[in-house]
């Protein structure tokens, strides 16, 4: 079984909290995982599998803590061929077209770098749930075998 690198993109801490809950739950199930909130390109290229949990800021923008690594990944284009990944996006549908924009940007970038999406991106709408960790945990449990199995 491979290990899972969880990447959290957050402004106010919601996505960080969700990522911590996911890490705790998966670790409790015996899955080897690490949580990065200030990742480098190497964290992406060295990972066996990637789970991105990110909120969106501005107008569809990546949170500041992932801004640099996002542009480094674009510039350096490390091939992530076949690396299993999934993206959970926290957003707010009142932002209209930019709903979950940061998650969409990661989904597109990792796909471009030839990583292997094991699931469609999960969209969590702050207008609809006050407990994003619950929805994300349920979803993660349905895809974890595809990530690290
Ligand atoms: C200034 C600001 C801008 C935001 N822009 C967007 C946006 O463009 N699209 C979206 O889906 N959500 C947007 N949101 C909603 C956040 O992504 C959402 O509230 C999320 O749960 C925040 O998680 P965090 O605490 O991890 O940053 C915005 C929130 C704020 C405060």
Image (tube, rainbow, N blue to C red):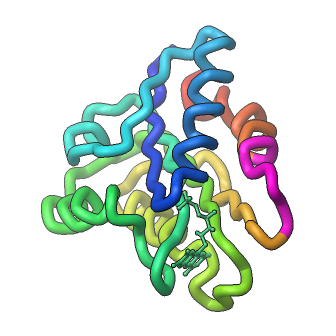
Estimate the x, y position of residue 69 in percent, counting from the top left: 25, 57
Is residue 107 in the magenta section? no
Q: Which residues fall within the magenta stretch?
A: 128-135
Quadrant for the C terminus, please: top right
Magenta stretch containing residue 130, yes or no? Answer: yes
Q: Report the residue at 59% width, 42% height from top.
A: 17
Along the line of sight, the residue nearer the viewer: 24 or 142? 24
Residue 105 locus on image (x, y percent)? 45, 71
- Above or below: residue 79 compared with residue 28: below
Residue 95's place in the image compared with 26, above or below, is below
Residue found at the far left of this picture:
76
Residue 89 is situated, as x and y percent measured from the top left of the image, at 60, 61
In the displayed structure image, the side of residue 10 where residue 87 appears, left or right: right
Camera-side residue: 86 or 127? 127
Give the residue drawn at x 74%, y 51%: 132
Q: Residue at x 66, y 12 (%)?
A: 28
Q: Name, please, the residue furthest toward the front.
A: 12
Instruction: Report whether 126 appears left or right of 97.
Output: right
Left or right: 145 as drawn, with respect to 1 = right
Q: Residue at x 68, y 13 (%)?
A: 29
Instruction: Tell me the quadrant of ligand 1.
Output: bottom right
Rendering coords of residue 32 (x, y %): 49, 15
């Amino acid at each position: 079984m491979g290990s899972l690198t969880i990447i959290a993109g957050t402004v106010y801490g919601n996505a960080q909290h969700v990522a911590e809950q996911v890490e705790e739950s998966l670790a409790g199930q015996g899955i080897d995982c690490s949580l990065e909130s200030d990742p480098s390109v190497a964290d992406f290229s060295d990972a066996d599998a990637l789970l991105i949990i990110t909120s969106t800021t501005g107008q569809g923008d990546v949170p500041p803590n992932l801004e640099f690594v996002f542009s480094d990944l674009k510039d350096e284009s490390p091939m992530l061929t076949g690396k299993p990944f999934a993206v959970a996006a926290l957003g707010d549908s009142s932002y209209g077209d930019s709903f979950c924009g940061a998650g969409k940007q990661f989904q597109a970038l990792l796909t471009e770098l030839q990583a292997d999406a094991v699931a469609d991106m999960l969209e969590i709408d702050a207008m609809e749930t006050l407990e994003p960790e619950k929805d994300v945990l349920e979803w993660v449990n349905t895809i974890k075998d595809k990530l690290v199995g």
